Image (cartoon, rainbow, N blue to C red):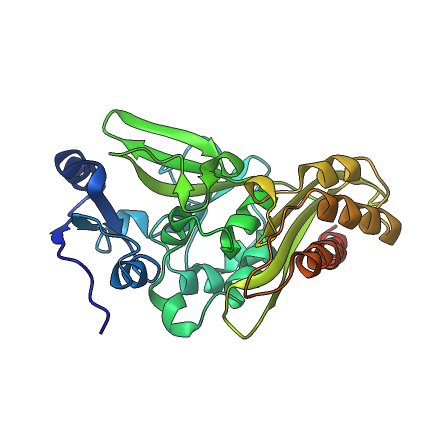
Amino acid sequence: MQVPAYVEYEKAASVEHALTLLARFGPEARILAGGHSLIPMMKLRLAQPETLIDINGLAELSFIEVESDGSAGLGAERRSGGSGGSSPRTGTVLRIGALARHAELLADPAAGEHFAILHDAERVIADPIVRNWGTVGGSLCQADPSEDLSAAFAALKATMVIRHPDGSRTVPARDFHTGPYETVIAPGELLTEIRIPIRPGGGSAYQKVGRRVGDWPVGAAGAALWLTGDGAAIADAGIGLTAVGAEHFAAGEAEEFLRGAPATEDSFAQAGDIAAEHCRPVSDQRGPADYKRHLARELTIRALRRALARAQQDT
């Protein structure tokens, strides 16, 4: 029978209280959000925190909303569960609270309208039970090298907001993970939200291959494209990769190649080659390294192709 080691338990009443508890119990304390990654690791004794700080009750971190850039908290144009309507003006961001559940992000109309990649990724994360309780922030902070949302947010060039006792700081999504199961979050800090700038003329998509439904990916790719005014060329691109050894979950060299390139199958094929070339997959129970490199190429091409189709529909 798998039983976690003895652990103290504290329930936070607010973000400030959570930060106070983190300061009190020190670096051996861990935040408990959804718990679907941390608790299994504790049962296997792969993680043995001295104190769990439960933040599940913090409604202030359970939001998904579109707001004017730079005015977080000052009048959302649309909140999670809101009705449709006209697209917000340029200079807006999608804000996702760290305690937003996977199921909430999957169901949110604003997230799907502006960033279809998020709905693509959420549909293939685990199963409905996990999606109903697991959190976006918890998945990112677990920092599993095969985690789906890390690649999606890397493709979208999101920004992480991290709170500490003296205020907050922002970190690009691509700098958030420092290694397998490691992030830039220091002792006493807490991830509170993710911000994604909304830009016109864009489309995005996520493609994944797994051994079975809901499993960690053998390989996966996310892509975001923004087209030039006439739609013939690529103004900007973002490519996220997971489970294939891509540095910072991104394919920066392939993105650089795509900027200014024609939005064609040939461009996508070359970008796929570049993305695969710069991956460092390892052979494991999910497949050999050569197969994973092949997936990196093919899934990059498929994600780019689907992102283009969505961008063209939006122009």
Q: Quadrant of residue 26?
A: top left
Residue 131 appears in the rendering: yes
Above/below status of 254 relative to 209: above
Up-down relation of residue 262 to residue 286 (above or below): above
Q: Which of 83/258 is in front?
A: 258
Would residue 168 appear left or right of 188 to someone viewing this image?
Answer: right
As drawn, is 315 to the left or to the right of 133? right
Residue 22 lies left or right of residue 106; in this view the side is left
In what quadrant of the picture does the N terminus appear?
bottom left
Q: Tally the marks.
A: 0
Q: Quadrant of residue 255?
A: top right
Q: Residue at x 72, y 46 (%)?
A: 275
As drawn, 247 above or below 276: above
Q: Position of residue 141 (x, y in %)?
A: 38, 47
Q: Nearer the viewer, residue 110 or 133?
A: 133
In percent of width and height, residue 182 lies at: 40, 41
Give x and y (percent) for residue 94: 49, 45
Of residue 302 and residue 168, the one placed in the foreground of this image is: 302
Q: Which residue sits at x=20%, y=37%? A: 19
Which residue lies at the image location 39% right of the left edge and 36% below the top edge? 161
In x, y percent, where is residue 47? 28, 53
The answer to whether residue 56 is left or right of residue 250 is left
Outermost residue toward the top in this view:
166
Q: Is residue 198 visible?
A: no
